Image (cartoon, rainbow, N blue to C red):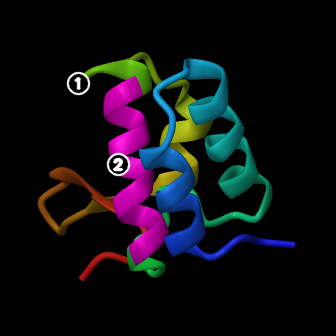
Amino acid sequence: YLYSSRTLQQMYKSTRKEEDITAIQEHMLRHDVYLDRQYRGYYYLSQKIEGDLYDDEHPVSWNELLEDYQLFKDSQGNLSIQPKGWG
């Protein structure tokens, strides 16, 4: 069962313990809504969690990168990268 983004937001606001924040993150990951732009409430909360757990930067594996982003190559061979589903 996926809790609503509003419920998860309330849980998040009521705690500052890393283990509780991680539990909220794992719940959203299990239901494939974590950092997914098509679900605004979950995406907004995901960004807050990312900031709490990882500050501004954290290492990302190539597999994680390719799950979330799409590579593009133009006719001149220039590469660009954009989030999947963006635009």
Q: Does the magenta stretch include residue 57?
A: no
Q: Is residue 51 magenta?
A: yes
Residue 64 in the image: above or below residue 79: above
Label at residue 36: none
Q: Mark 1 points at which residue?
A: 56
* Left or right placement of residue 64 versus residue 79 in this view: right
Q: Start and end of the magenta stretch? A: 41-52
Dot 2 or dot 1, earlier in sequence? 2
Check disc 1: other Cα within 10 Å, few if <14, some if 14-19, many if 20+: few
Q: Mark 2 points at which residue?
A: 47
What amino acid does circle 2 point to? Gln
Picture coordinates of residue 64, whole percent (x, y):
57, 38
Question: Residue, x 48% and y 40% (percent of image)?
Answer: 65
Picture coordinates of residue 29, whole percent (x, y):
70, 51
* Rendered-image quadrant of the C terminus: bottom left
Residue 70 in the image: above or below residue 41: above
Are circles 2 and 1 on residues that touch, CB within 8 Å? no
Of residues 45 and 80, which is closer to you in this image? Answer: 45
Check disc 2: other Cα within 10 Å, few if <14, some if 14-19, many if 20+: few
